[in-house]
Structure formats: structure tokens, C-alpha cells
Image (cartoon, rainbow, N blue to C red):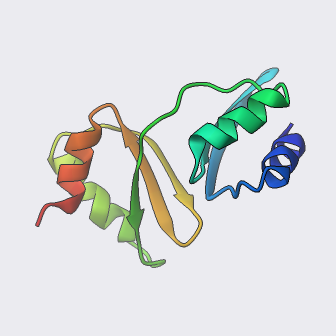
Amino acid sequence: MLAQLGEVLGNAGINIDGLAGYGAGERATLHLLVADAAAAREALSDAGIECGEDREVELVSIVDQPGEMGRHLRRVSDAGVNVDLAYLATNTRLVLGADDIEGLRRALHAG
């Protein structure tokens, strides 16, 4: 399925900037980071690949060194915001999601 997903998006000219996923039995859940979610959804749907809901996330450029993730996420934790999605994407970017996306953004960009 991952090969098909990559081929479908590649044939549509859509670059995958980030990907996180896990399998559970016969199903898998993926979060794809792409520049044009509507185009990706259309290409995948046309290929018969089920798509869930779009999700707004925050991208944080980080330095590839020990402690960098903790430095950013300490502010989020101290602000009382619960992160429910986190992974690294291309170009050393941290992808973060939270139910309170605005609170996440405020915490990350404070100070």
C-alpha cells in the first residue's frame, strides 16, 4: 500500500514532505504532510485509497542536535497544551498537532 501511495502521489507530481504511520491489524493510519492536501486527496481517492480528514499542524524548524525537541516542547508543556501528533519531516522540521492548535502556536512562538 505504501508503494502504491508513493506512486500515485509521484505520478500526480505531489511531493511527500513528511510521513508518520502505524499499522494495526489489516489497517494502517498515516499522516501525510504535503503542500496541497486537496490535490493529494483527489489523487489518492481516484486510486481507491481511503483518506481521512485533513488536519492542521504546526511546523517547527529545528537544529539536528540533542535536546532540540525538548527545548521547543518544554514551552508547549508549560503552557498546558497536549501534543497528540509529533514526527520529523524533511528539512529538519518537527511536525506537531494538538486539539488546541492555536495554544500550540502561541506556546511555540512565545518569547
The residue positioned 23% from the left and 47% from the top of the image is 77
Q: How many marks?
A: 0
Q: Is residue 7 left or right of residue 54?
A: right
Image point 43% across, 75% down: which residue? Answer: 66
Q: Is residue 35 left or right of residue 27?
A: left
Q: Position of residue 63 (x, y in %)?
A: 43, 78
Quadrant housing residue 41: top right
The residue located at (29%, 62%) in the rendering is 72
Q: Position of residue 107 (x, y in %)?
A: 19, 53
Location of the N terminus (image quadrant): top right
Between residue 22 and residue 47, name the one nearer to us: 47
Dividing the picture into quarters, in which one does residue 17 lie?
bottom right
Q: Is residue 52 left or right of residue 72?
A: right
Placement of the C terminus among the 4 image quadrants: bottom left
**Residue 95 placed where, x, y %?**
46, 53
Q: Residue at x 64, y 50 (%)?
A: 19
Residue 100 located left or right of residue 15: left
Residue 14 in picture, x, y percent from top left:
71, 54
Q: Is residue 28 above or below residue 108?
A: above
Q: Residue 108, relative to residue 6: is it above or below?
A: below
Seen from the viewer's position, the closer of residues 78 and 7 is 7
Residue at the limit of the structure toward the left, as seen here: 111
The residue closer to the viewer here, 24 or 60, is 60
- Above or below residue 9? Residue 100 is above
